[in-house]
Image: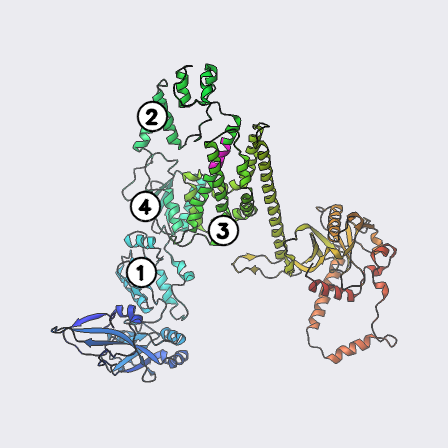
Amino acid sequence: MADSSIVTLGAARSLLVDSSVCDSRIVETTKDHTFLGMTCEDGEDVLPKVETRVVLVGEAGRNKALVKALQAIRVMEVPVVKIREGEAGAEEKMMIKSIVNMDISSPFIKTDKVEEFGDGENADFETVFVLTEFDSPEYDYLYKHDNRIVGPPVVLHCAAKKEPLQFSCRPLYCTSMLNLSLCFTGFRNKEEMKNLVNLVHHMGGTIRRDFSTKVTHLIAYATHGEKYRLAVCMGTPILTPLWIQKAWERRDDVDFHASEEEFRTKFKVPPFQDCILSFLGFSEDEKANMEERTLKHGGKYFEVGDERCTHMVVEENSVKDLPISPSQKLFVVKQEWFWGSIQMDARAGESMYLYEKNDSPAMKKAVSLLSLTTPNSNRKRRRLRDTLAQLTKETEISPFPPPRKRPSAEHSLSIGSLLDISNTPETCKTLAESSRPSKSSTPALSKPSARWQVSKELYQTERNYVDILSTILQIFKHPLDKEGQVGGPILAQEEIKTIFGSIPDIYEVHTRIKNDLEELLTDWSETRSVGNIILKYSNELVKAYPPFVNFFEMSKETIVRCEKQKPRFHAFLKINQAKPECGRQTLEELLIRPVQRLPSVALLLNDIKKHTSEDNPDKITLERAIESLKEVMTHINEDKRKTEGQKQIFDVVYEVDGCPANLLSSHRSLVYRVETIALGDQPCDRGEHVTLFLFNDCLEIARRRHKVISTFKSPLGQTRPPPPLKHIALMPLSQIRRVLDLQDTDECMNAFALVVRPPTEQENLLFSFQLAGEETVKSTWLRTLCRHVANTICRADAEDLIQSTDPDSLQVSTKDMDSTLSKASRAIKKTSKKVTRAFSFTKTPKRVIQRAFLANNTPDEKTPRLSCENRIGNSSTLAAHHSPSMVNLPSMFERKYHTFSRSTTHLF
């Protein structure tokens, strides 16, 4: 095999070697060099004759699960060396090492004395010893004599995976660190490091002296050094030694692997480990926040000047001079180092964030220019103005000069008219030359019109707005989207999408608007149309803005939640919000700009229209543009209202246990919510607290739960409180025949009733309620209900659906609703229902049920009869009935109605 590892020997022969001959490099390449035969091209090389066997030592032989697993393993990996002659005339020969699979010759052997089989130099046998303890005299003996040793988890792992019994050049207890390559840094105690290395080898891992791309984990005692920096740059996990120790404690768990993220992240080296920080120039609140996060991320803090401090974090914008002379061991860094370390979840390199005073040569030169005191010098004035612009980082107010006068009008200008010209270098020169006619062919600048000034303001605000959108994308969104972030992704993609929404689409359309405005002002004339630019992009504005504005509140909530729950995101915001591009504004403050932009544009267009003459064609175009913006904003508001309405429906679904899923519909919206108390036996027991949810086409009826269920946990791991309400019925408004406004009496206050007829019933049903609380005005609620009922059944006379009725005629009363006797009777009724339900679930012989029916019937009445008086007449004759049966409806209707309410859930 050409790729096999090769060593040279003076003289040797083909033989089977023990595991001590093979170093760890065989283990790393064993899968690439496995073969089932040793025959070469000449056919002379064959497998050596060797007897393979497995020996169970001590407790391992008494482990039934281990014995059963070993019976399923028929093959083991065996190290083999073959000798190949060198080139002609060469004295040295090549020894090629490989791993082969061989059948296990004899059944396993149990023993308590390893000395009988522990001769590691016997080439006739390839023996694997299974030990339960690697800290025992048996282990020491076998290890000293270079025997193959494995732990029970290795056997169980190979049996479960149906793999050959693995070969390892070192004792292998388990496979918890199989395929892991570790590197150590920062250790001073060599004995501790030696013990950790042995544990890694026992779990199947390998150790590398130097850090490279093959290293999968760095075990660090400190947050400095070359290996640490390389691991941070390459994104290699940096863990504490405790990770190895805790993995060893779980060595008997066959399904466990130390690289599992949930387990591994518990042992990450915190960014401020071994760091003692002090803070200078921060407010008390900000300082307290940073000190708290220092402790959370493994560091300590002391006051400025303490000799134990390793870092001084400085607020560079407020600190001019340091109060102390820092020692050579003290790092004086900007606050960006602090937040950057938290964001990366690793200590950042200090060299990039060292604090320096604002006394650079450029700043000194700027200050010297500010000290000029010769106002009569135009040159010095110009230098002063340029210096101020440089210090404040301001650009020219506008890249567009005011429109120029015609050349023919240049010589007619007087001194007085020149005084009104904009203060530019060209006009200052004209003023200096008094009224002398210019020989230049360049036309002089005219006084800019008000229309041009407002158009320029529209452009400037548009340019600033595009810059803000660019800042949001370049400083915040794109870094969060970037792959290969140090420490892993800061936010999930769903969270990024929720926060930024359609900002990229808004940025794209406004960039084109800005470019068109720039082109318009560059080649300005009073007849150029500003309105056409807005009309041109009105459709794109309609598409881009609603997705963002509708979910802006959700975007803010996501930012607040992620900032609290994710320290790296909090540090990311701190770093970027301190950059000059953000102007010290938070991400939330920047994201509100799109919400404010369109109303601002509409106001500017109104100003342009005011300064546009009636005969200018742009006058009508501007009016159309303003109307189009109003339509966009109306569309946004309407979509926002619909979105909020859909959110309200979701809230109802989450609040009501058993709420039908088909309540969610694009055409449905929540109109009213009313808290009531049931006064009759339907749709639930008297005295039950009932919530009515009025939608535009249906009525959801729910009662308060009697028993609190366990907390609900979503698939995302977020918990919600249990639903406080229980679904009773989802009733189409078309089933409401009449709304009864029950007159207030001494025994009935603030009550109303609904006359309904489900499609499964031949007669009407009566639902009576009392409004709970004073926040709901009964007249307003009833009118709203009737209006939507009328809309559903296509009637214009909504007021005719309300009928004022005496509650005594229906025997509806609100008296003693909260009395002790009433509560006791309701409790008894609930208890009796529970007993009935419990009995119904027991297995009852059929003959017993038949006897019960026969015993209940009289000789003259063979079948149960229902009185006609127990039904309510239709709505037209309702007032003529004064029977108590109007409230005491038979149980048959209750059964039918409940059947209807749970089956007829599809509304049309």
| Residue receiving disc 4 | 350
Whole-number angstrom distance, CA of label 3 to CA of label 4: 33 Å
Q: Earlier in the sequence, mark 3 or mark 4?
A: 4
Q: Earlier in the sequence, mark 3 or mark 2?
A: 2
Whole-number angstrom distance, CA of label 3 to CA of label 2: 49 Å
| Residue receiving disc 3 | 497
Mark 2, secondary structure of its residue: helix
Q: Are marks 4 and 2 in contact (CB under 8 Å)?
A: no
Q: Amino acid at mark 1?
A: Val
The C terminus - image quarter: bottom right
Between marks 4 and 2 in the image, the one whose residue lies nearer the viewer: 2
The N terminus - image quarter: bottom left
Q: Position of residue 173 (x, y in %)?
A: 34, 72
Mark 1, secondary structure of its residue: loop
Q: Amino acid at mark 4?
A: Glu
Q: Earlier in the sequence, mark 4 or mark 2?
A: 4
Which span is picked out in magenta?
Answer: 456-464
Type of secondary structure dominating the magenta stretch: helix
Whole-number angstrom distance, CA of label 4 to CA of label 2: 34 Å
Q: Earlier in the sequence, mark 1 or mark 4?
A: 1
Specify few, some or many for label 2: CA neighbours under 10 Å numbering under 14, 14-19, or 20 or more: some
Q: Amino acid at mark 3?
A: Lys
Between marks 1 and 4 in the image, the one whose residue lies nearer the viewer: 1
Viewed as shown, does residue 705 lie left or right of 401?
right
